[in-house]
Image (spheres, rainbow, N blue to C red):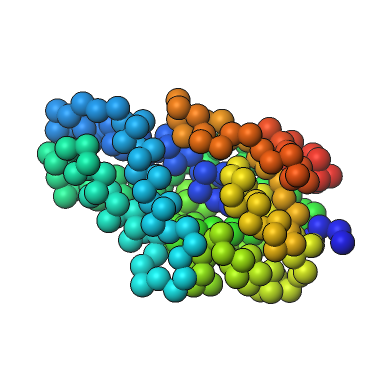
Amino acid sequence: MAIKALTLDTGGTILDWHGGISRAFAAAGARRGLEADWHEVTNEYRRRSMKGMVGQIHPEFNFDDVHRRVLDEVIAHYRLDALTAEDRDVIWRTWHALDAWPDFPAAQARLRRKYVVASLTLLTTSLVIDVSKKNGFDWDAIISCEMIGIYKTRPESYLKAAKWLQLDPSEIMMVACHNFDLNAARECGYKSAFVKRPAEWGPSGPPDPAPNPAHDLIVEDFTELATRLGA
């Protein structure tokens, strides 16, 4: 079947979380006279947060809650206890003010001329609304796993999104920079497109940089994706 919709991972695929959060940590640390490898601290924060959210079923918390709880864990782990409650709140709220990768906004507009374009994300609905307003994103739909109650990479999350879009999974292409997300979507019948994000994890590089060759498309950025899809 022809592709009618694109569902887009939003965290690392569209948003530069590492840049935003590492700068927030560094600024807070400078205020308190703390020194640390802020890139490492940020990546540990991300790893623990993802572990706390991926695959959850009807949790009593959302990703904002996980980000807040894990922030305290990471601060304790790296002995950064001089960071105040205000500092922590600023870091936590930075998630709602992240910048987009520069290739995305213009490419999104191109893609929407031909396809339904929806966010399919672990992030909270509120977070996606806030970053969309900041960066000028224009979605046909925001589908947060918070709405579904079952989180990627469980099959139910992809199948429910397809049902809500009133499309067969084979008519949808999942777009992400993570094999684990795309592989799970493929198992549900989706097409898959891997967008490379070599800077997602900062200087250390992504933990899973090599795309699965089985993906239907492998592209350098969203500009190339739009071109390859004829948008």
Compare residues 194 and 228 and report the one nearer the observer. Answer: 194
Placement of 216 over or under 28, stated as above or below:
below
Direction from residue 173 to residue 27 in the image, left or right: left
Q: Position of residue 202 (x, y in %)?
A: 45, 30
Q: Nearer the viewer, residue 11 or 126?
A: 11
Q: Is residue 222 above or below residue 68?
A: above
Foreground of the two, 102 or 29: 29
Residue closer to the observer: 59 or 116: 59
Residue at the (18%, 48%) spot, across then down:
86
Q: Quadrant of the N terminus?
A: bottom right
Can you give x and y, in whole percent of width and height, for residue 145 in the image?
52, 65
Q: Is residue 42 above or below residue 143?
A: above
- The residue at the point 49 percent across, 62 percent down is 55
* Residue 150 drawn above or below residue 223: below
Left/right placement of residue 40 relative to residue 33 reads right
User: Is residue 116 in sight in this rendering?
Assistant: no
Horizontal side of 8 relative to 64 (left or right) equals right
Q: Is residue 70 visible?
A: yes
Q: Where is residue 70 drawn, in percent x and y?
A: 29, 52
The residue sitting at 60% across, 52% down in the picture is: 181
- Number of callouts: 0
Place residue 34 in its image quadrant: top left
Rendered location of residue 119, percent (x, y): 59, 58
Residue 224 image-quadrant placement: top right
